[in-house]
């Protein structure tokens, strides 16, 4: 079980080089889901003396290791520092959940919205020729509205019943 969890960078170490956790797999990745604090403290002490502690913590965080102490971090601590990459939709949602402003994520999100709207507009034009949804998408994208979408919009609003103007109402 332990060999499957050994990070690749540890396998590349020279044979005569050992990390403090070498031979202590049961301590670092115990079989119980909630090990006692004494085991966790002992594992952290070994990690504190390790020359590649940060690389180990980074690997465990990036691969989302669910169990054990890696680089001195428990699973809960690794989850707390995990953040999606900026510029991704997950990164944008993460910043929004924390009320943080990230220009990279906002611009990438806006571009994804624009691309989705462009794709829907093309679909509207392809399937319907012109539609009210197409008209609204053109406005959202800042594009000039096409003749077909304007005609559909005019027909739509012309068919709606109109309330009499307040100033044209007659007194009863």
Image (cartoon, grey):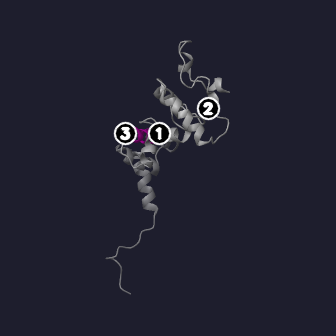
Label 1 sits on residue: 81
**Front tag of 1 and 2:** 2
Residue reaching furthest top? 15
**Front tag of 3 and 1:** 1
Q: What segment carries the magenta color?
A: 103-116
Q: How many marks?
A: 3
Label 2 sits on residue: 27
Considering only order in the chain, which callout, 3 or 2, is on the residue closer to the N terminus?
Answer: 2
Measuring from the top left, give residue 150's x and y in whole percent.
Answer: 40, 50
Look at the image and tell me in which quarter the N terminus lies: top right
Measuring from the top left, give residue 31's x and y in whole percent.
Answer: 67, 35
Q: Is residue 34 above or below residue 56?
A: below
How much space separates mark 1 and mark 2, taking CA atoms?
Answer: 23 Å
State which quadrant residue 161 falls in.
Answer: bottom left
Q: Residues within 10 Å of mark 1 (few under 14, many from 20)?
A: few
Answer left or right for 35 relative to 149. Answer: right
At 42% from the left and 68% from the top, the residue drawn is 162
**Front tag of 2 and 3:** 2
Q: Overall secondary structure of the magenta stretch? A: helix
Considering only order in the chain, which callout, 2 or 1, is on the residue closer to the N terminus?
Answer: 2
Label 3 sits on residue: 107
Indicate yes or no whether the magenta region holds residue 113.
yes
């Amino acid at each position: 079980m332990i060999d499957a969890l050994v990070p690749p960078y540890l396998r590349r170490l020279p044979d005569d080089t050992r990390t403090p956790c070498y031979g202590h797999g049961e301590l670092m990745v115990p079989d119980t889901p909630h090990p006692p604090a004494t085991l966790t403290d002992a594992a952290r002490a070994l990690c504190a003396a390790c020359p590649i502690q940060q690389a180990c913590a980074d690997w465990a965080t990036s691969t989302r290791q669910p169990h054990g102490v890696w680089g001195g971090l428990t699973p809960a601590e690794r989850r707390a520092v995990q953040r999606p990459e900026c510029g991704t939709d997950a990164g944008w949602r993460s910043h929004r959940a924390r009320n943080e402003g990230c220009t990279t994520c906002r611009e990438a999100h806006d571009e994804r919205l624009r691309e989705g709207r462009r794709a829907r507009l093309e679909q509207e034009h392809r399937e319907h020729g012109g539609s009210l949804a197409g008209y609204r998408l053109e406005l959202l994208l800042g594009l000039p509205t096409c003749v077909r979408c304007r005609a559909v919009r005019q027909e739509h609003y012309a068919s709606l019943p109109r309330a009499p103007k307040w100033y044209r109402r007659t007194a009863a």
